[in-house]
Image (spheres, rainbow, N blue to C red):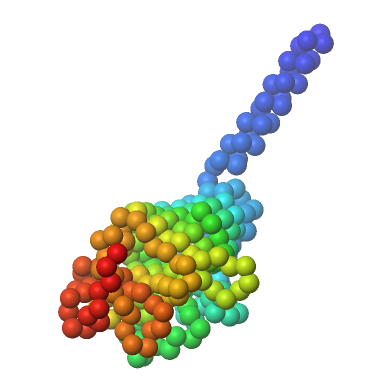
Amino acid sequence: MKKIAIALLSLLVLFAFSACNNETNSSYSITNFDDLVAFASGEHGTLGVIDAEEPIALASQVVLSDGLTLDGNEKTLTIVTPTTGTSASDKAALLVTGDNVRIENLTVEGERTGNKAANEWNEGEYGIKIYDSTGVVLDNVTVKGMQAGVQVNGSSVTMNGTITVGENIWGGIEVSKGSAAGLDASSLTVNGTIESSNTEVPALWIDGREDGNTVTGSGVDVLTKIDAPTGYTNQTWYLTTEQNPGSGSWPTTTIEG
């Protein structure tokens, strides 16, 4: 009888562990803004999948914590600019402050149109901002209609798949290091493809090239690297073939290597 009781107890423990493990590994369905906020806080496992039939409008900034994977499922998040955030360090529709966060198959869309002359910088408004984080991955992500698409700030980020950032006012992807104490230089590795045909602003740029910020990978190797125009101090710009880097609208100083 004692052996049977022990066996039954073992089975109950195994069942409980299995149920807990399955709950942890299952995805959380995101159908509205409140679902997205709840997932971003880490309350519903580590995998969230957007299942909304219509684009989800962001009522405020969404902050992603450690270890989360947000699968956009080819859906769109919309944001009415200016986006929330108390300062230039955190203005963005999606703010990543956790390590090992993954965002995939997602479009983030603002409402800005026109060019730089018609749009003030306003302390910076990004579709996605990654701040003081490591091990972050963006895979098949589009950002458009923002002042700038993606900012990598004091973080290490990998980009896979297709990253589309051409329809933003001031540029596609910024790699920089903020002024906060203890913040490391940024490193961006692009294994996929950066897409932009915008002939006014860079697809990718380093702001603070003397701060140790780096961009590498096969997706960077195919870009044309140029000195930024007058007025953009300590910046290096990267252009896609579609941006026609040899045209007269860009600086003529091409940087090798």
Q: Which residue sits at x=57%, y=76%? A: 179
Answer yes or no: is residue 48 visible: no
Taking the image as shown, residue 76 lies to the left or right of residue 45, namely left
**Image position, residue 105 (x, y; %):** 39, 55
In the displayed structure, 51 sits above or below 249; it is above
In the displayed structure, 194 sits above or below 146; it is above
- Nearer to the camera, 41 or 219: 219
**Image position, residue 150 (x, y; %):** 43, 69
Q: Where does the N terminus fall, quadrant-wise?
A: top right
Q: Which residue sits at x=66%, y=27%? A: 15
Q: Outermost residue toward the left?
A: 247
Answer yes or no: is residue 143 visible: yes
Q: Which residue sits at x=48%, y=80%? A: 124
Taking the image as shown, residue 68 lies to the left or right of residue 234, namely right
Q: Which residue sits at x=63%, y=34%? A: 19
**Image position, residue 80 (x, y; %):** 47, 78
Q: Where does the C terminus fall, quadrant-wise?
A: bottom left
**Image position, residue 106 (x, y; %):** 41, 59
- Nearer to the camera, 7 or 94: 94
- Res 214 → quadrant: bottom left
Taking the image as shown, residue 50 lies to the left or right of residue 143, namely right
- Nearer to the camera, 170 or 94: 170
In the displayed structure, 107 sits above or below 252; it is above
- Res 55 → quadrant: bottom left
Q: Outermost residue toward the right?
A: 2
- Nearer to the camera, 202 or 207: 207
Taking the image as shown, residue 32 lies to the left or right of residue 10, namely left
Q: How many marks?
A: 0
